[in-house]
Amino acid sequence: MQQVSASPTNTLALKDIHLPEQIANYPVAYGWWLLAAIIIFMIIITILKIIKSTKLNQVKKQALSQLKNNSQMTNSDMIALLKWASMHYFSRAELAKLFGESLKEFLASKLPTKHQQTFAELSEQAFINQYQAHCEVNNNAESDEKLQQAVLLWLNCALPPKPFKNKEIDKSTTQGVNA
């Protein structure tokens, strides 16, 4: 058996091991930059949509909170609240001249068809009593309760108005918050 010596004189002329250069993380491939740009773009679009939705529903939420927090609202107060909320979403010029039955018909027309009949039935007595000098107290309390249900139905189902799907848009309905 041969002896192995640890001295460098007996060994063959070996060269030192050289480690390769460290591979850099940058520049990142173009695909990663593209993916990062798309993700940032999607985040910005989402944030803008949330902000727009919040602004669009702000008046609706304010009207609902006013209706729920004020239990002593009369019929005329609730009708005024409906008109105020609708003026923020629909044409002010068109709504300002409406009152009584014409206002009720306008409000009902802005609801989906499945809710129009319910709104008309619940609000009918209130719109009739609106311009009468004196009403029975019992009839007035029942009318107030029904109108409050009608106002809740209208605020929840009609606001904010759904955008038109036809290409011809009626400019008179886009003067409020939608514009």
Image (cartoon, rainbow, N blue to C red):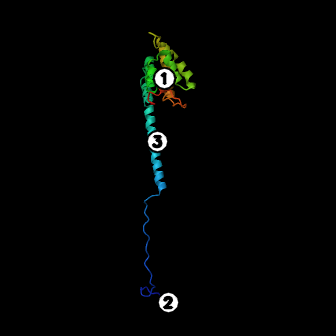
Residue 18 in view, yes or no: yes
Using the numbered discs, state the Cα–Cα distance from disc 1 to disc 2 in whole angstroms. 105 Å
Q: Are marks 1 and 2 in contact (CB under 8 Å)?
A: no
Q: Residue furthest front?
A: 168
Q: Position of residue 127 (x, y in %)?
A: 49, 15
The answer to which of 20 and 81 lies nearer the viewer is: 20
Q: Residue at x 47, y 54 (%)?
A: 32
Ranked by sequence position, the earlier of labels 1 and 2 is 2
Using the numbered discs, state the Cα–Cα distance from disc 3 to disc 2 in whole angstroms. 77 Å
Q: How many marks?
A: 3
The answer to which of 165 and 89 lies nearer the viewer is: 165
Residue 142 in view, yes or no: no
Q: Position of residue 15 (x, y in %)?
A: 44, 80
What element does badge 2 sit on?
Answer: loop
Q: Amino acid at mark 3?
A: Thr
Q: Residue at x 43, y 31 (%)?
A: 58
Residue assigned mark 3:
46
In the rendered image, which quarter is residue 72 located in? top left
Q: Amino acid at mark 1?
A: Val
Q: Which mark is residue 151?
A: 1
What element does badge 3 sit on?
Answer: helix
Q: Residue furthest right?
A: 114
Ranked by sequence position, the earlier of labels 3 and 1 is 3
Depicted 108 relative to depicted 137: above or below = below
Quadrant of the image for the C terminus? Answer: top left
Ranked by sequence position, the earlier of labels 3 and 2 is 2
Q: Are marks 3 and 2 in contact (CB under 8 Å)?
A: no
Residue assigned mark 2:
2
Q: Residue furthest bottom?
A: 1
